[in-house]
Each structure stands twice: as C-alpha cells, then as structure tokens.
Image (cartoon, rainbow, N blue to C red):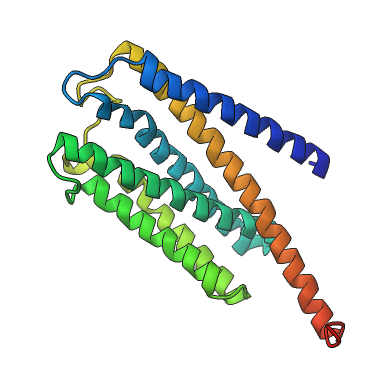
Amino acid sequence: MCEMHQIKALQALSVSSALTLLAALYAAFVYAPIEKQMGIVYAILFFHAPAAYAMYIAFGVSAIASAAYLIKRDDRWDAWAVAGAEVGTMFCTIMLTTGPLWGRKAWGTYWTWDPRLTTTLLAGMIYFAYVVLRSFGGAGEVEKRFAAGLAIFGLLDLPVIHYSVQRWRGTHPTVITGNGGGLHPDMYPALILGFVLFTQLALLFMWLRARLELSRQQFSAMESTAAELGLLDDV
C-alpha cells in the first residue's frame, strides 16, 4: 500500500473510531438499562471486556510479528512487534484498572488472586518487560532477538487467561457466556459497540506506532551510516 493510501486509510479509521466512540458511550450510559444490584458500575463491563479483547489482539500481533522478524530479519516486522507490545500493554493496564473497580463493588475488595486476574497480571508483566527492554536496552540485534523471544513466550499465557475461569473455577464472572447471569437484551448493543470500538482503536494505535517505529529505525540507520562516513564530525 502506497503512502497516500495508508494516510487515507488511517484517516478513515480515525473517523470511524471517533464515531463508534460516541455511539458506544450513548449505548452504555443512555440506552442500556442500569443493572439492579450493581447500578451504574455495571457499565464497566462494556469497556472492560473489549479492553481484554484488544489486549489479546495486540499481544498476538506482537508475538506473530516477533516470530516473523526472527525468520526474515525485516525491520517492518520488528516495528509491528514493538507496536503490538506497547498497545497491548496499554489495553492490559485498562483491563487491570477497570477490573478492580468492578471487583470492589462485586466482591467487596479491589483485588483477589483469582486465576484470570493473576494470569493477566503475568502477561502484562511479560510485555511490560518487552517494552522496557526495547525502550532502554538499546536497538541492537541481540536486544531485538531477546525481546522477540519474550513476546513469543508471553503468547503462551494468553490461552491460559482465556480458559482459566473454566479450568480453575475462580471468582471472575463469565457474564457474556451466561454463567454469570447473562445480559439484558438492551445491553448487547453497548457491549458489541465496545468490542467494535476497541478493535478499531487497537488497529489504529498499532498502525500509527508501527509507522513511527519504522521511521525511527530508518533515521537511526541513516545516522549510523553518516557517522561511519564521517559526515557528522563537523556537526
């Protein structure tokens, strides 16, 4: 895809995300009924679950792009790996922030060492380590390969997060599947719009971050070449 087409696609995705955000907010706080027991706090579900889904997407992209980089040694794959790790960490933070707010109302405490909470925290720590390594550990080939291995290792935790509730019967509710009481029919539009919104945001943020990272790598490569040629001696 040429540069002009990429810019137009990013603009279209940005506009679509903004419109979906407005629709999701309306559906969550105006259209959807207030839950009888938890009240307005129940609306956290419409953003908490989609944030988890966006986290899966971003971490998955980071791991797949990391594997592709190890095979092809193409900086474009490395840029997408960095983007996926950073965006996934952001959505993981949103998930781990909104979850305890729900938990305080539902369980009377902000945190329990529930299997899903614990495995999610583990995934967040793995990819946060990736982000720290790439941010402060240099941009050499060794650092890139080690970070790629870290991203692939973190991918193994994602299925554990998803199936932890069924496997270990934690306290985390499974509202969407119906085991936690199900949803009122008028709540589904808010939840669906939440998933659409966070999917769009994940794609948009990763795309922008990958472009920025690739530009940074290209500039760094040109700077290194100029230094080797002695072109920076007089600067």
Please, is residue 167 above or below residue 29 in the view? below
144 vs 52, left or right, is: right
Residue 4: give x, y in percent of width and height: 82, 40
Instruction: Tell me what residue is drawn at x 25 percent, y 44 percent.
Output: 100
97 or 172: nearer the eye? Answer: 97
Q: Is residue 63 visible?
A: no
State the image quarter where residue 55 is shown.
top left
Please, is residue 5 above or below residue 68 in the view? above
Instruction: Tell me what residue is drawn at x 39 percent, y 48 percent.
Output: 92
Q: Quadrant of the N terminus?
A: top right
64 or 229: nearer the eye? Answer: 229
Please, is residue 224 above or below residue 209 in the view? below
Instruction: Tell me what residue is drawn at x 48 percent, y 59 percent.
Output: 151
Instruction: Tell me what residue is drawn at x 44 percent, y 43 percent.
Output: 56
Residue 109: give x, y in percent of width and height: 14, 44
Q: Quadrant of the C terminus?
A: bottom right
Q: Is residue 224 visible?
A: yes
Residue 12: give x, y in percent of width and height: 69, 30
Residue 61: give x, y in percent of width and height: 54, 48
